[in-house]
Amino acid sequence: MQFPVLALPLLAALASAIPNPSGAQVTPAPLAAKRDLTHVTVTIVNKMPQSLSTSVASNGGDATLVSGGGSGVMAAKATATIVAPQNWNGNVAFGLANYSSMQVPSLIEPGLTQVSGEWMFDIDVSYVNGFTVPITCTCNSGNTFLSGCNKDLWALATCDQDGETKIAAAGACQNPTNEASGSATSASPFFAPCAGKAYTFPNDNDANSEGKCDTGSATCCVGTAADGC
Ligand SMILES: *[C@@H]1O[C@H](CO)[C@@H](O)[C@H](O)[C@H]1NC(C)=O
């Protein structure tokens, strides 16, 4: 089985869910409450006042989306839905539609992966490649925070520190602490305000949501707190 990039925290969470062999009472890990899901549903809401470019990609040879694949444009205030089957892992990329290219975009990374015979939903927001727009994902059950950050990083810092590169044609800030950069343990200055919420470097695992949304239905809000996210 080919593990997605985020397999290591998933295995760590799995280890913590293994029953205590002594039979002593242990507090169940969040993973123990996961459901045996057949599909997951991700609703995307564009709360920004601008149109978004979107693009859905699958990791490797997994199953295809039930619906909602491909590339497109979401108008301001528009809503879109993705339904993904078992064994699907991938991402949805977002950028402002007024830019001519999509590079190092903000991502959501949903997946439905089999763990110890049960199908577990995971979704994260990743700025590990770069940042275009803010995204926050919550579980529809209880409106629980899962992953992401509703801060407009463009308003908080300039994208030119510690190897950060602004890509003008894409309206993007390229993250220097990406997968190719090795084992960073902290975010670069532009990305730091979202560290531990969205992935801002590959091991930024406080941004992980595995096992926290066992209903398999989440909503991802694109925009800032002021936009309503
Ligand atoms: C795209 O729209 C944003 C938000 O209105 C604006 O800040 C930016 O300058 C625009 N970029 C281009 C290339 O038109």
Image (spheres, rainbow, N blue to C red):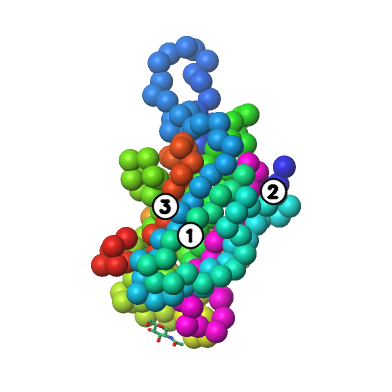
Which stretch is magenta? Answer: 86-105
Q: Looking at numbered disc 3 in the image, what kind of residue is underneath it?
A: Thr
**Res 5 visible:** no
Q: Nearer the viewer, mark 3 or mark 1?
A: 1
Q: Residues within 10 Å of mark 3 (few under 14, many from 20)?
A: many
Secondary structure found at label 1: strand
Q: Quadrant of ligand 1?
A: bottom left
Q: Is residue 9 above or below residue 91?
A: above
Q: Earlier in the sequence, mark 3 or mark 2?
A: 2
Which residue shows up at 71% across the image and 55% down it?
60
**Residue 15, quarter of the rendered image:** top right
Rendered location of residue 14, percent (x, y): 54, 33
**Residue 181, quarter of the rendered image:** bottom right
Which numbered dot is residue 63? 2
Q: Is residue 87 magenta?
A: yes
Label 2 close to label 1 by CB (< 8 Å): no
**Res 217 visible:** yes
| Residue ID for mark 3 | 219
Which residue shows up at 56% across the image and 75% down it?
103
| Residue ID for mark 1 | 80
Q: Quadrant of the C terminus?
A: bottom left
Q: Looking at numbered disc 2 in the image, what kind of residue is underneath it?
A: Ala
Q: Nearer the viewer, mark 2 or mark 1?
A: 1
Which residue shows up at 57% across the image and 81% down it?
101
